[in-house]
Structures are given as structure tokens and as C-alpha cells.
Amino acid sequence: MVTIHQVGKKKSKRIRKHHYTDVRSLFNSPHKRGHVVKLRIVSPKKPNSAKRKIARVKLSNKFIVSTKIKGQGHNLQAYSQVLVSGGRANDLPGVRYNMVKGKFSFNWKERELRCKARSKYGIKVEDLLFALQDLDSRAEENNKKK
């Protein structure tokens, strides 16, 4: 049975909690455009050792985030336009974003020819075939010189 006090009490609406994701700077969009503010080389957390390349990027929504530069070699400088997507670097604290290769001024070309995992690095089949033909022609030229 309900008491008089319980009837008189006004039911308060249930307040929903806001759930924020790690990539809240992207504002529920898969990618954001930005420009590079600063380039750095950092070393990863304890069990790993290397020299990882990261960049501070100012996004189009005025957020400044740390992003990992994928692959081997890059052509980035300060004020280069890049496309940023979510995805953290496990061994770099505070780095929660990746750059998309092959968009704006972030070139897909690397020091070594990449045949596997091309989709992660923005390398199309035509680009790969063109690069292979270029390598073949260079090898032929070197053979002729010898």
C-alpha cells in the first residue's frame, strides 16, 4: 500500500549518464581534417624500444591531439594538411589517433615498397603496379651500366 508521503512525492526523471569515447575530439565522425603543428620522435613504454614518430595536429574543430604517423618514412612538415582517424597506439601514452595515408599532403610513398596491408596505408593496386614497373626499369638501367 502506498503512503500519503509517497503519493505526494514528485517522481524525478532518471538522469542518463553521458558516455564519452576516447576519440571524443572527432565528435562522432570517422575522420577529421587538421594541420600539423609539431613533429616529434618519442620512445614507447617499458617492454618496447624504438623511435616512434608522432605529430601534434590541430583539428578543424580547434582540438589539438597527438597522432601516430604510420609506416616507414613520411613527407610531413609543420602546417601540412592531414586526415585524422581514431585508433590508439598501444605503447605510446596519450596517443589516441592515427593519420590516414594518401590524403591531402600526407603521401603514401614509403622508403620500402609495401605489398601487404596496403589498405591501411592508402596504396592502390595501380600505384603498386606503377612502382613495380619503375623498379624494374631502374634495375634494367643498372644492368646496362655494368
Image (spheres, helix red, strand yellow):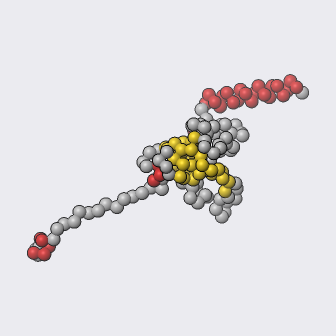
> Is residue 26 found left or right of 98 in the rendered image?
left
Give how far across and how far down residue 101 sits, in percent.
59, 40
**Count of numbered tags:** 0
State which quarter of the image contains the N terminus: bottom left
- Please indicate whether residue 32 sits to the left or right of residue 19 in the image: right
Q: Residue 73: tell me if it is visible.
A: yes
Question: Is 77 located above or below residue 17 in the figure?
Answer: above
Please provide percent x and percent y for residue 68: 60, 50
In this view, the residue farthest toward the top is 144
Q: Is 45 rendered above or below residue 27? A: below
Query: On the rendered image, what quadrant is the C terminus found in?
Result: top right
90 over 135 or under it: above or below: below
Q: In which quarter of the image is residue 83?
A: top right
The residue at the point 66 percent across, 37 percent down is 109
Place of residue 33 in the rendered image (x, y in percent of width and height, measured from the top left): 51, 42
Q: Front-most of 49 and 34?
A: 34
Residue 118 appears in the picture as rendered = no
The quadrant where residue 7 appears: bottom left
Q: Which quarter of the figure has residue 18?
A: bottom left
Q: Which residue is drawn at 70% across and 56% down?
A: 50
Q: State the residue in front, 86 or 118.
A: 86
Q: Farthest residue toward the right?
A: 146
Instruction: Please report the residue visible at 86 percent of the width from the left and 24 percent of the height from the top.
Output: 144
- What residue sits 42% from the left and 57% below the top? 20
The x and y percentages for residue 129 are 66, 28
